[in-house]
Image (tube, rainbow, N blue to C red):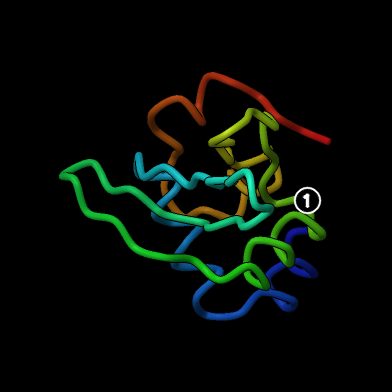
Amino acid sequence: MIWFLRWRLKKGDVELIEKLSNGWTLKSHRFLDGDKHYKLYGPEGEESEILWSQVQRLLRLKVISTNQKFPAATFLLTSQGQALAKSGARGVGSIVKFDS
């Protein structure tokens, strides 16, 4: 199954999975007007915007899952996402299992 997922991922998806497995945090920030922004936060304070389409693709492939909190939901790698990562997951993602 993992080979099938690798085939469906884009280069940026693989990079995002690797970052999540190395302690980065992906959050969805929701606003009262309905607007939603996805941001990736690094362990050294780095941050970058992530495209809605990329997050939706990873959700659809069940590589990531979310805790559905408002106003900022956190995304974690599922077991499939952790299996796709070349290195062992570190941080909260290696402790909390969000398989859907």
Query: Whole-percent x and y of residue 91?
Result: 39, 28
Report the front residue among 4 and 61.
61
What percent of the width, then of the height, locates residue 97? 66, 25
Residue 69: x and y in percent read 64, 28
**Residue that lies at the very extreme toward the top in this rendered image:** 95
Q: Residues within 10 Å of mark 1 (few under 14, many from 20)?
A: some
Residue 15, relative to residue 40: is it above or below? below
Residue under the image location 45 percent in, 37 percent down: 89
Q: How many marks do you count on the picture?
A: 1
Question: Which quarter of the picture shows residue 36?
Answer: bottom right
Foreground pick, 19 / 67: 67
Q: Which image quadrant: the N terminus?
A: bottom right
Residue under the point 70% across and 46% down: 80
Nearest the eye: 82 or 40: 40
Asked where in the image residue 65 lies, by quadrant, the reply is top right
Residue in the picture at 72% in, 78% down: 7
Give how far across and how far down residue 86 sits, in percent: 46, 55
Q: Which residue is mark 1?
A: 62
Amino acid at dot 1: Lys
**Residue plotted at (63% across, 67% down):** 52
